[in-house]
Image (cartoon, grey):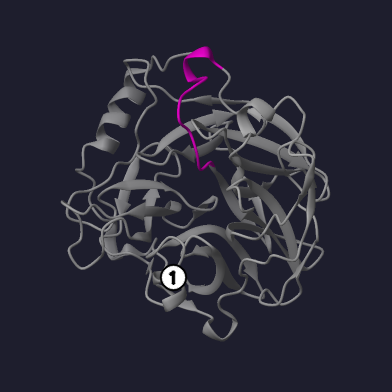
């Protein structure tokens, strides 16, 4: 693992984490608001009908019976393709796929497209499964998915790729250095740029960049979107680029949402956060999950420039508040469809919901 030796980078990291960032003038970088498409929500719910033969349990399981949630989304062939996490009665997660012409009426495939199996990933994926996908497109047409492998002890950030969204090649655990073998890692959001209705991974300073983590937010870089290296501080630890804030909605944990979007004003990261019972936002419940937004420098992606004082989305509807996991809005999916941003998020820890976001 190559450590960051540049004094400039070290100083920039310390600045990014110091809490001294000032808001950008006029907050022009921020998305303005989110509107739930209530007549369609919840968009997807647990379903005991779909069956899948689990090669490890050696029997058929109702693989969507307990929960469907935390979806990624992408546009292909003028359709929205949603890759969502589903749990069976044992709590094992698999990733399913559904598609829609209008972004609100989806047709599901009957079988998962990514699941634990007797393969090289079994030791990491069994029996917790494959969780919480995020998806981007490389400029040569390769779809790249980051997901979490969970063995019921340690969560590890992993990667898979596909040309057609249904057949996926597992590339393994993302961080292969021995020191990260048992390091808890999740939620990989790759920096992208919108090109028409496509979201394309974007190189900055000759590298791809990714925000990751589910306590603090860290960074990693890649030359090809497949092999990744965590960025480290002067002590050789993963470099923190954003941390929870006492007194705010994001006071307990923070983690990246969908891809990070390069747009006017910088790299905008929509992120998921939970509220601390003792030191958080007193208007929210303990552990309530909300969606916030932050902006990083387009030239120096590790440099945090500003973040919102208020959440963009928090649990307000009954299906978000009274559910398997109460008070949760957890955003993974975002597409540009017919001139608007469509958001797909996990609601209440067991359902999928849809919203529209304004520039």
Query: Which quarter of the picture shows residue 184?
Result: top left
**Residue 47 belongs to magenta span:** no
Q: Is residue 54 visible?
A: no
Q: Is residue 257 above or below residue 171?
A: below
Please name whichever residue, 178 or 6, is drawn nearer the observer in this view of the structure: 178
Give x and y (percent) for residue 163.
82, 45
Query: Which quarter of the picture shows residue 20?
Result: top left
Residue found 52% across the figure and 38% down from its top: 210
User: Which residue is situated farthest in the bottom direction here?
Assistant: 39
Q: Main secondary structure of the magenta part?
A: loop
Please name whichever residue, 92 or 41, is drawn nearer the observer in this view of the structure: 92
Give the residue number, with chain letter if any, for mark 1: 320
Please name whichever residue, 21 or 219, is drawn nearer the observer in this view of the structure: 219
Give x and y (percent) for residue 261.
52, 53
Give x and y (percent) for residue 97.
74, 58
Query: Which quarter of the picture shows residue 16?
Result: top left
Give x and y (percent) for residue 79.
76, 68
Q: Is residue 216 above or below residue 282?
A: above
Q: Which residues are magenta?
A: 177-188
Left-right relation of 261 to 59? left
Q: Is residue 206 above or below residue 329?
A: above
Q: Is residue 14 visible?
A: yes
């Amino acid at each position: 693992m190559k450590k960051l030796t540049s004094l400039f980078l070290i100083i920039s990291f310390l600045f990014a984490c110091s809490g001294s960032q000032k808001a950008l003038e006029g907050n022009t970088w921020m998305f303005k608001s989110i509107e739930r498409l209530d007549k369609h929500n919840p968009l997807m719910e647990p379903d005991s009908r779909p069956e899948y033969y689990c090669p490890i349990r050696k029997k058929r399981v109702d693989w969507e019976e307990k929960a469907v949630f935390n979806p990624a989304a992408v546009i292909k062939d003028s359709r929205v393709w949603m890759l969502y996490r589903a749990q069976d009665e044992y709590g094992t997660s698999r990733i399913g796929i559904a598609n829609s012409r209008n972004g609100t009426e989806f047709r599901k495939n009957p079988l998962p497209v990514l699941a634990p199996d007797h393969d090289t990933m079994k030791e990491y994926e069994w029996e917790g499964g494959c969780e919480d996908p995020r998806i981007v497109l490389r400029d040569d047409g390769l779809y790249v998915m980051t997901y979490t492998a969970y063995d019921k002890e340690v969560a590890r950030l992993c990667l898979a790729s596909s040309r057609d969204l249904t057949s996926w090649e597992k590339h393994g655990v993302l961080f292969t250095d021995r020191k990260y073998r048992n390091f808890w890692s999740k939620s990989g959001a790759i920096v992208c740029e919108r090109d028409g209705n496509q979201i394309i991974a974007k190189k900055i300073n000759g590298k791809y960049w990714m925000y990751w983590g589910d306590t603090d937010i860290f960074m990693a870089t890649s030359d090809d979107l497949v092999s990744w290296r965590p960025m480290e501080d002067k002590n050789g630890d993963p470099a923190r680029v954003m941390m929870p804030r006492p007194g705010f909605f994001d006071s307990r944990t923070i983690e990246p949402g969908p891809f990070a979007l390069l747009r006017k004003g910088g790299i905008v990261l929509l992120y998921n956060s939970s509220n601390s019972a003792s030191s958080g936002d007193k208007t929210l419940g303990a552990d309530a999950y909300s969606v916030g937004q932050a902006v990083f420098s387009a030239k120096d992606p590790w440099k945090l420039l500003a973040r919102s004082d208020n959440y963009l989305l928090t649990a307000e509807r009954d299906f978000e508040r009274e559910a398997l996991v109460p008070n949760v809005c957890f955003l993974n999916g975002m597409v540009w469809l017919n001139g608007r941003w469509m958001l797909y998020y996990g609601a209440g820890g067991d359902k999928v919901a849809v919203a529209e976001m304004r520039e």
